[in-house]
Image (tube, rainbow, N blue to C red):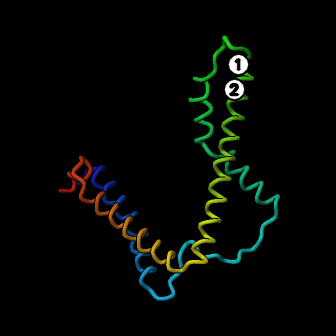
Amino acid sequence: MCRPEAVTAVLSAAVLTVPARCSARKAVRPGGRSAFTNQELAQDGTGKLFLMGFLTCLLNPKVAILHISLLPRFVDPTLGHVGLQGVLLGLTQIAMGVAGNAFFIVTAGSVAGFFGRHPLWQRVHRYVMGTALAGFAVRIATERTGAAVALR
């Protein structure tokens, strides 16, 4: 009988093996495409993009759990209005999220542009990522922790 830990280890290794195999196949195939290849996309309206982002944030349970469980620990009733402290903490979290997302957007655009101008580095990236994912999959499958030992 298979234990849940064994199934989890096998599935984790498989999840990493599939992208590693695809990345490796793309790396060696002549004319293969990278995930960083620039593509022409249909432009969506500002309202649609805003609504998609708003609904994604609104329906994300992690944000609700953060605000309900973590932020109240930083509210001190002796320092003044508790509601105002909660609002300030929430606004701080929103500002940090916007800054972090802006950083990732700018960085992703810069990296995509760099790889678009340097096909050799694009190919090196595919080789490195394929090898890394395959290595992680092998490590997960052969690890001597409780999950991997259950397979033997």
**Disc 1 designates what residue?**
82
Residue 10, quarter of the rendered image: bottom left
SS category of the residue bearing label 2: helix
Residue nearest the observer in this picture, 9 or 32: 32
Q: Are marks 1 and 2 in contact (CB under 8 Å)?
A: yes
Quadrant holding the N terminus: bottom left
Q: Residue at x 72, y 14 (%)?
A: 80
Label 1, label 2: how far apart the Cα atoms are: 6 Å
SS category of the residue bearing label 1: helix
Q: Position of residue 32 (x, y in %)?
A: 50, 83
- Taking the image as shown, residue 99 lies to the left or right of residue 123, namely right
Dot 2 alpha-carbon crowd within 10 angstroms: few under 14, some 14 to 19, many 20 or more? some
Residue 109's place in the image compared with 42, above or below, is above
Residue 42's place in the image compared with 78, above or below, is below
Q: Residue at x 60, y 76 (%)?
A: 116
Q: Position of residue 130 (x, y in %)?
A: 40, 71
Residue 142, quarter of the rendered image: bottom left
Quadrant holding the C terminus: bottom left
- Taking the image as shown, residue 122 lies to the left or right of residue 141, namely right
Q: Position of residue 147 (x, y in %)?
A: 26, 50
The amino acid marked with disc number 1 is: Val
**Disc 2 designates what residue?**
86
The amino acid marked with disc number 2 is: Gly
Q: Position of residue 40 (x, y in %)?
A: 70, 77
